[in-house]
Image (spheres, grey):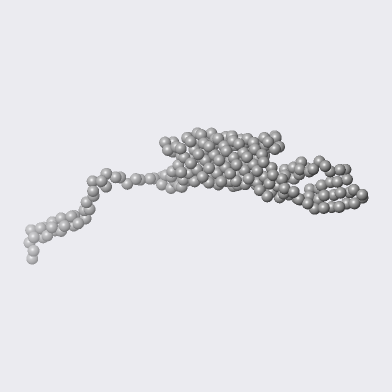
Amino acid sequence: MLSAKTVILVLASLVVTVDGLSQVKRSKRSSSFAVPRVGGNKARIICPIFEASRYPYQGIGFKLGDPFALTYKFYANKHFAFAVDAGKAASGLYNKYYRGAFPSYLPDTLNSNQSITYLAHNAVADWFLETKFLFQWDAEKISKGLQLYAGAGWQWRNTVLEYDYNFNDQSNNQDDGKFGKFTETRFTYGPVLLVGFEYSYFSLPISAFIEVEVFTDALLDPGYQRFQGGVGLRYVF
């Protein structure tokens, strides 16, 4: 039988061997870093953009509505921004207006026995470009990551309309109904005023926004006003 002294020596040797194998040496560099811990709501949602110390930002994306547009926004600082939108207007929303413009394109050389009747129209092209200066402020008391903004800008519009009509000539008691069509280009511009809000509390560097604008024609139909607006997303970098 092994003596008690021998058993104690064997156990002591095993403890020293296991302890030596279980230890992994760490470099001086790695030992200086601590593992970050994120808890609570921040473990689920982290807002990576619009930190006050990291302005300016830029954003590029799209807007759906009237008009449908590609949109770029430059966030100069926490309160001021500049935006440019370019795209296509929702022509269907302007059908009544474009139909009402038809008489303005009729020739003034018709005599009392001649008339031209509107049949239909088609917006072959309806493009716009818009620049906007914006003032924005935090609305975190309402929701984290929410900003409200208001601003003013200028919009240029170029619309190509194709009208179908019927020409009637009752001279000599004859009614010669003749189908015809013509094309008109409407270029105009004017100021815009707008309000909106932008939400950016996502785990990705994107922002979502909704805005409403009022456009006032200053060239082709002075005083004509139209509400516009839409919703969109921008990738912020």
- Locate residue 187: give its quadrant: top right
The answer to which of 222 and 173 lies nearer the viewer is 173
Count of labels in the image: 0
Residue lying at the far front of the rendered structure: 109
The relative height of residue 175 versus residue 219 in the rendered view (above or below) is below
Q: Residue at x 46, y 37 (%)?
A: 56
Can you see residue 140? no
Q: Residue at x 69, y 42 (%)?
A: 186
Q: Residue at x 12, y 60 (%)?
A: 10
Can you see residue 98? yes
Query: In the picture provided, is 119 more to the left or to the right than 211?
Result: right
Q: Residue at x 62, y 47 (%)?
A: 88
The answer to which of 16 and 125 lies nearer the viewer is 125
Residue 125 % position (x, y): 66, 48
- Locate residue 108: give its quadrant: top right
The relative height of residue 193 versus residue 65 in the rendered view (above or below) is above
Query: In the picture provided, is 203 more to the left or to the right than 160?
Result: left
